[in-house]
Image (cartoon, grey):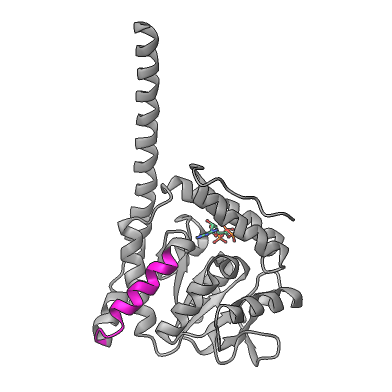
Amino acid sequence: MKKIEVPPDHPRRESLEVRERVIEGHEKHIVATAGLLAHGRGEAFDYLIGEKTSEQARRAARAAVAAILSADNPVVSVNGNACALVANDLVSLSKATGAPLEINLFYYAREREDAVLKSLRRAGAERILGTHDRPSTTIPELSSNRRKVDTEGIARADVVLVPLEDGDRTEALRALGKFVIAIDLNPMSRTATHADITIVDNIVRVLPLMNGLAQEMKDQPREELKRMASEFDNRANLSESIRLIMAHLESEASRHISLHENTVEGLATS
Ligand code: ATP
């Protein structure tokens, strides 16, 4: 399919370009059809948060990087959407923190695994876990393909970063005693609610931010990093993230009232 060129002055250019990347990922079999819908849901929440990284999300990202850097066995889980959107950034984060990448697909197909693998390799990944030829163990709480985790990856990990995960799996990982970091634009999703740290932001903005933080924080004492991660209050974080949506909606509502008043005034004086 021909790629749509987004005009440089289009007001929603960034969002449309990101959407094109997901569509392209779908055509290359990296993204499942359901992944297109998941992306649409994300776009809607991004609109609600004002399509920018909040201070609150920055705080969550800092705590998340602290948790990854101070972990014994951190792992970054990769699904189709994350791969289509931020393959390079995931590889950089993996290299900067020593956390291996593990492919984990909700809608498993060998073709999808191969496409994700190819894309991660092209982005420079050297060690990729979770492929069909790797040793695996199962998460007892889950049915479906996603029970399978890499024996040397998520199975023995203490900290797992799950960009765009589903609620069941996040809950299962928590039940196994993992410290789970989620990236999810919806602060009300089950994933967001079950994680230890939820970064309420778009992965396309937050992954580069996390890479910068990893460089900045990598020499900080381990105990200090561990404390930052454990002191993070995810309940307060999610509550503040929902309040930010409400504040954004309030300001949009006021903007429309003043636009309306100006129009009425203009009509009266003309
Ligand atoms: P849950 O099972 O956690 O309640 P869900 O059923 O609401 O999840 P899914 O369809 O499994 O959601 O996954 C989509 C989730 O990923 C949504 O919460 C959506 O906001 C989020 N999402 C989609 N695209 C992005 C993105 N680019 N960055 C961050 N989050 C995203």
Quadrant location of the N terminus? bottom right
Q: Residue at x 66, y 91 (%)?
A: 134
Q: Is residue 95 magenta?
A: no
Question: Quick check: 143 left or right of 153?
Answer: right
Q: Residue at x 54, y 87 (%)?
A: 153
Quarter holding residue 154: bottom right
Q: Nearer the viewer, residue 259 or 11?
A: 11
Task: Say if 54 sits above or below 90 in the image.
Answer: above
Residue 178: tell me if it is visible.
Answer: no
Task: Say if 72 sits above or below 57 in the image.
Answer: below
Q: Nearer the viewer, residue 47 or 172?
A: 47
Quarter of the picture for ligand 1?
Answer: bottom right
Q: Position of residue 224 (x, y in %)?
A: 24, 82
Quarter holding residue 68: bottom left
Q: Residue at x 60, y 60 (%)?
A: 21
Q: Residue at x 27, y 85 (%)?
A: 219
Prevalent SS, magenta region: helix
Q: Which residues are magenta?
A: 206-221
Question: Quick check: 238 left or right of 136?
Answer: left
Residue 125: tell me if it is visible.
Answer: yes
Q: Position of residue 143 (x, y in %)?
A: 68, 74
Q: Position of residue 119 (x, y in %)?
A: 63, 75
Q: Is residue 209 magenta?
A: yes
Quadrant location of the C terminus? top left
